[in-house]
Amino acid sequence: MAFENLTDKLNEVFRNLSGKGRLTESDVKTAMREVKMALLEADVNFKVVKKFVSSVQERAIGADVMNGLNPGQMVIKIVDEEMTELMGSETTEIRLEPGREATVIMMAGLQGAGKTTTAAKLAGKFKSKGRKPLLVALDVYRPAAIRQLQVNGEKQGVDVFAMEDGTRPAQIAQEAMKHARANGETVVILDTAGRLQIDDAMMQELSDIKEAVTVHQTVLVVDAMTGQEAVNVAKTFDEKVGVDGVILTKMDGDTRGGAALSIKAVTGRPILYIGMGEKLSDLEQFYPDRMASRILGMGDVLTLIDKAQEALDKEDEEKSRDMVGRVRKGRFDFNDYLESMKQMRKMGGMSSILSMLPGMGMSKDMLEGAVDEKQLKQTEAIILSMTPQERANPKILTPQRKFRIAKGSGCDIATVNRFIKQFTQMQKMMKQMGGMGGRRRGRNPLSGMFGGMGGSRRGGFPF
């Protein structure tokens, strides 16, 4: 994810501060200089950095902090609060119109920012909340964009409205509104054309669409990989067309992350969502406080729980409860293990999950190294080479059966034996842990999903 280098550098600054029993004004100023350099290297807007560092330093040199029991922790708390304030403090939702009137959302942005895919992702979000969205293809210059929207709309189970070549985008938008009223669609998402760079023709086309239909929300899609250029694009679009909110895409890539920390402060427009991958489900609500926690290396457990709950909601509720019961009784079998791996992938894989846990302090390379994906695939191949009876009851795995499984999964018998032994040890440990927490009421949304997933592969778990 973005911010890896920034997180590493900030953690180094905080480690130095926490190692001091008392802080002097000089200590704070030295730390703030390092924070300033780290933010600038992360491509955060210079004016934003200057104001941010000044605010933190002013609060940190107060008597309550300097004379406190743990001044280093107090400085971290101040940085966390100021960073949250920088990104908007409160989470902003796309405002939907009340009653039967359809909410019209116009998606705008430069070509290559991921606008068409994001439109489909957004439609999926609204559908999951009980709305009936309609995707409208207004990029009449690129047939591939229309086809892409149709394919993604089909995957999301969302209707897509398109017209023949030669029809003006503003006219298509008008016809789409008639279609939406006739079919009871409550959210209309207009996927407009992009350009390689901002030009007058693009801005005029967006203005024409706004004149042709009532646009309730204009959402700008920008590529986080472009850093400060994304901030400049947002500022220009807002000045010329008017923007209600921003969606940052490619936040899972090797971006320095400066756009996320700068857009709200420079444009005054909130970040609504962030794109965290290419899958149509990889669109996260933007929470400024949670993002600040991620940047400071404190994890994001709330988003992890939200992801887990969302994945569980799509599964049969009785099946989920049954898995939790088997985990507590130590009856977690290979079928449950496969189910856990499936749920893990829905949430972006183990590396993504680890990145949200507090105290991990790992870079992207370290996180990927902590989980051996090749070994996970081998483990899955071993289980898939078993019969249904063998998956449900590991005790019947005789040497002959293990030999057949090893041959079917393309590994040696020693690997199969090692995995089964580790799995058996994990079952015993889970039974003991289940007994300890058996009296607790309620259900943790993570328990059914990760009942079979343990710590690092070095700790005896089958990773």
Image (cartoon, grey):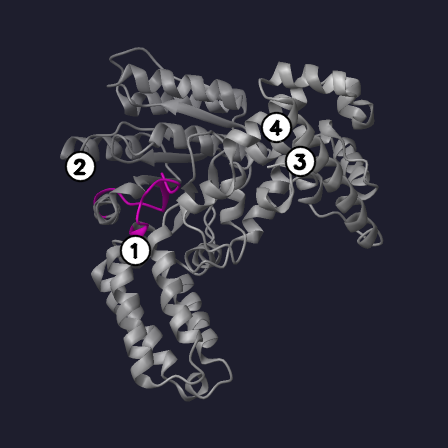
Give above or below for 60 relative to 126.
below
4 or 1: tag closer to the N-terminus: 1
Give above or below for 324 relative to 196.
below
Mark nearer the viewer, 2 or 1: 1
Q: Which residue is mark 1?
A: 262
On screen, residue 173 versus residue 97, left or right, reads left
Q: CA distance from mark 4 to mark 1?
A: 44 Å
Residues in magenta, as a range: 239-258
4 or 2: tag closer to the N-terminus: 2
Magenta run includes residue 250: yes
The disc placed on residue 313 is 3
Q: CA distance from mark 4 to mark 2?
A: 50 Å
Q: CA distance from mark 4 to mark 3?
A: 27 Å
Tell me the residue at 59%/36% (across/down): 344
Q: Which residue is mark 2?
A: 198
Q: Amino acid at mark 4?
A: Thr
3 or 2: tag closer to the N-terminus: 2
2 or 1: tag closer to the N-terminus: 2
Mark nearer the viewer, 4 or 2: 4
